[in-house]
Amino acid sequence: MTVTTDPVALNEWVPCAWHGQIAIGAALDTMIFGQDIRVERTGDQDYRVTTFGGDSPRELPVQTRYTCVFTTLGDDPRALPEIPEFDEADRRITGCGRVGVNTSPYRIVENFLDMAHFSFIHTDILGAADQTEVLSYRTEHRKDVDEIWAIDCTFYQPAASKAAAGGQLTKYLYRVMSPFSVMLYKNVATDPSRNDAICVFIQPRRETECLAYMPMAIVDEQSTIADIIDFQQSIFLQDRVILENQRPALLPLDPTYELPTRADASSIAYRRWLKAMNIRFGILEKQAA
Amino acid sequence: MSVAQGRWTGVALDHQIQPASSNPVVLNGQALAVWRGEDGPVRVWEDRCPHRGMRLSFGFVRGNTLRCIYHGWAYGADGQCAEIPAHPALAPPKTICANSYPAETRYGIVWTTLGDGASGPPDLGPDEGWEGVRSLFVAASAEAALTALARFDFGAGATTRMLAGDIVEVSFGPELRMLVVVQAMDDERAALHAAAKGARATEERAALAKRLERLRADIEQA
Ligand code: FES
Ligand SMILES: [Fe+2]
């Protein structure tokens, strides 16, 4: 495809590498929204991102946060979200690398928001085969930050995290920060007053070709970083099989094309929000005929 | 597309669709799930769960219901959603229904159509005595496969006859007949499904399958 002309998609910050992926002095060629870009690491914390191919090259804005290098093609982008947990001193911060997924970015966000699949796709880990019920929860559009939240979510989990010693009723809080980023807070096995924060930031290479980054700020004194990454990646690989076999890969926004139930309240709110912002990139109904 | 939308086409051999299985098939670019309950006939559905689009050919069969692998929604033989595990107490609304196509087994072959199915699969005589030989998947258009099939030398005494646009009959004398149906998957891929009938059908099955394997080379070289 050519570079998208969708102003809504263009005005988002998206990740283009994880910090540490590129050696100092080296560069990585990649793509966002159909645009070829080069990410050069010019110093320990310094990156330079430029477009190449097509029109005359231009330099893009860069920021490094949440273990990722972010850039944008837009002139007036939505700000990156504030996630204060990443600044708490005793948290284990890790990036988990990145995973390629051939589908639209929205399918990845919806899968992350979805509790109803735990018992089927993450059986005996995030869900039990005989406890499939999704209790009702609330969703809200927080207009001050323009984010979608799902609150009061609970689900029975046999092995909720690397640190979990047994089954628990896990409390979840979900937060969609942009069309291409989502995170959750889930209560920690060892300390009920705190939450693990797990994010997914998506780099859309093309409409149905993405790279997913999973920065986490975890409360876990025992597990090694390698164990935490391993756990998260094995979960994500189970999801990838599903994600790459949904049809169509593009997201339909017509509410009669795919039929939700109450458990999909967060997906319903997300789709409404996408529709209201009139985003076209990766949306089924917005394809040129 | 080579095959008119309304026409019935063979899409699998009956014996290949095992009890309690769901299988992917592509017909004219349309992805289908061809499945069978623990007993009973073959069903042909759109390969897309009405909930969130997961392919139903990845689903699993319990009794005579097909369950989607993603959230476990169960669909009865009529396509109606019968159970939503996220809400065990909820009776699923009637509007949640898998999109199904007409399906019929005849001459050892599973037939379907993307049209309304009014005409039924082709009538090539009585249904008794046919057994599936093999299916062949080729990297060629259905037209190219048909042309090579019509010209193929099946051996001494064999005569080849076009029965319909995409069906060929090969006769090896009074004791052995073979049907070969060509299914267009998309512009570059086709499948051939062969079934045989006659006193020598069972003993010749392996030999026929081998000849079809040579036919593949012919088709893909054309
Ligand atoms: S996509 Fe099939 S049950 Fe959800
Ligand atoms: Fe998942």
Image (cartoon, helix red, strand yellow):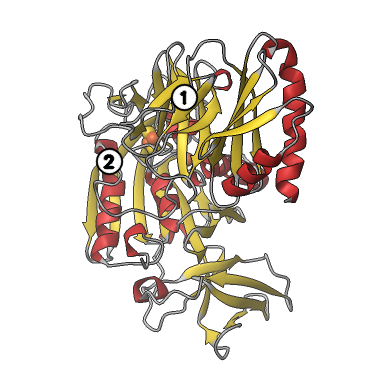
Amino acid at pointer 1: Trp
Amino acid at pointer 2: Leu
Labels 1, 2: one chain: no
CA separation in Å, label 1 and label 2: 22 Å
* Up/down of A191 relative to A255, above or below: above
- Residue A95 seen anywhere in this rendered image of the structure: yes
Residue displayed at 72% across by 39% down: B216
- Residue A126 seen anywhere in this rendered image of the structure: no
- Could you say whether the residue bearing mark 1 is in a helix, strand or loop? strand
Q: Position of residue A88 (x, y in %)?
A: 48, 57
Q: Residues within 10 Å of mark 1 (few under 14, many from 20)?
A: many
Q: Quadrant of residue A284 in the image?
A: bottom left
Q: Quadrant of residue A106 in the image?
A: bottom left
Circle 2 sits on which residue?
Answer: A259
Q: Is residue B25 left or right of residue B214?
A: left
The one of A153 and B177 positioned closer to us in this rendering:
B177
| Mark identifier at residue B35 | 1
- Could you say whether the residue bearing mark 2 is in a helix, strand or loop? loop
* Up/down of A274 relative to A128, above or below: below
Q: Position of residue A47 (x, y in %)?
A: 61, 78
Q: Position of residue B184 (x, y in %)?
A: 53, 43
Which of discs 1 and 2 lies nearer the camera? The answer is: 1
Q: Position of residue A175 (x, y in %)?
A: 35, 53
| Mark identifier at residue A231 | none
Instruction: Tell me, yes or no, whether the two marked residues, 1 and 2, touch with CB atoms within 8 Å.
Output: no
Residue displayed at 39% across by 65% down: A82
